[in-house]
Every structure is written in C-alpha cells, then in structure tokens.
Amino acid sequence: MNASTVCPRNDDALPPRDRGGAVWVFGYGSLIWKVDFPVRERAVARLHGWARRFWQGSHDHRGTPAAPGRVLTLVPAPGAVCTGMAYRVLPEVFVHLDRREQNGYRRVTATLHLADGRAPRGVVYIAEAGNPAWLGDAPTPVIAGHIARAAGPSGGNAEYVLRLAAALRALGEDDPHVAELEALLRAATGAPGSAPD
C-alpha cells in the first residue's frame, strides 16, 4: 500500500454540528500557520493529555516515498497540554482536510479547551503507531538530521519546523520538543534566529 494514498476513513465520526451547522477542528502543526481553507471562527485552544512529536513520516508533503520527511503527530502524554489553534468550519471543509492529512492520519474526536472558556468537541487528526507512514521515536539529533535532509512537494522539511516554532512563539507556547529541533536545525544550517516569511 502506498502510504501517500491512505486517507482518513470517511466513516471516522465528526462531532455533532453546532447551531450554525459547523464543526471545530484542532490544529497543532502546519494547521496553525497554513490555513488554506475557509474558517468561520478561530481561537487559541488547548488539548489535554497529548504531546507533539515528529514521529510521522511524510511521503506527500515534506518528503517523498523514497525519502520521507518527518511531520507531527500527537502521542498520549498524561498531564501534558498541547496548545494550538481551533477552527470552526463547515463539514464540507473536511473533504479538503482529509486530502491534506491523508498520509496515515485519522480523525479523532476530543474536547478542545478554547481560550474564552468554551469546551466544544472537535476533530483532531492523529497518526497512530502502526500506520503505513509511521517512523516513531528516535534521539532528537537523529530526528533533526533526518528533517534537515528531507524535502518534498510542499518544500523543505526544516521549513515546516521553523514555521511551526515561530507560530508557537506567537501563541506564547513553549514546546520543548519543537524548540530543541529548531535549535539543532538552525545550528546545522546556519539559519538566523528569525522565522522564515
């Protein structure tokens, strides 16, 4: 099976629509800084019990089938809090999002804690261990070296990390996994401390 063609199952349940017919979706990686879909509302949000990790392979965006890159997924982490962005969208947006998140991700429904105190149920795309593109854990310098070498149709893998690190700083979020990878990539490439445009 080609990992780049594995789409989220269409039967992965969406949470109930709200009174406006919309559904919330949580972004913790590129969905924070690359919003290429129509949004009715956006809010800083937190997801409890999960942590970001660059453990998922990317055969379709930041790598190729022959040389996959590394992108984010979430892994269970009791006590952890993952800060990102939540978007209120119409259900038809999931046709686009399912294509974008096709490389081993599936839809999971979870409670999102919005900055204004609301706690709607929303969709989170998670790539779990055992999916065809799974790369798993490795020492952080090994992950950074892998990312530094990888590139795909959406650009260099390092760009993904640098843009994410800048977006998280803008949210006031300190994610040690992302920050350590950013520092290693900047040291390896001689990139300046500012984020790319």
Image (spheres, grey):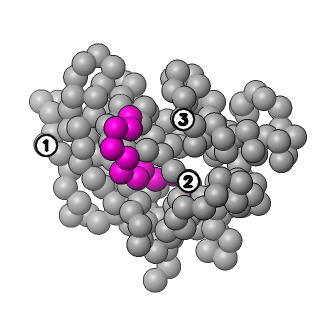
Amino acid type, callout 1: Pro
Q: Is residue 78 visible?
A: yes
Of the residues shown, which amino acid type is indicated by label 3? Asp
Magenta-drawn stretch, dominant element (helix, strand or loop) = strand
Which residue is labeled 1 in the image? 16
- Upstream in the sequence, badge 1 or badge 2? 1
Residue marked by disc 3: 175
Dot 1 crowding, Cα within 10 Å, few <14, some 14–19, many 20+: few
Q: CA distance from mark 1 to mark 3?
A: 31 Å
Q: Is residue 73 a member of the stretch shown in magenta?
A: yes
Q: Quadrant of residue 50?
A: top left
Residue sitting at x 42%, y 71% = 131
Of 10 and 82, the residue lying toward us: 82
- Residues shaded magenta: 71-81
Give the labeled residue for mark 2: 54
What amino acid is at disc 2? Phe
Percent position of residue 196, x then y:
73, 33
Above-or-below relation of 6 to 158? below
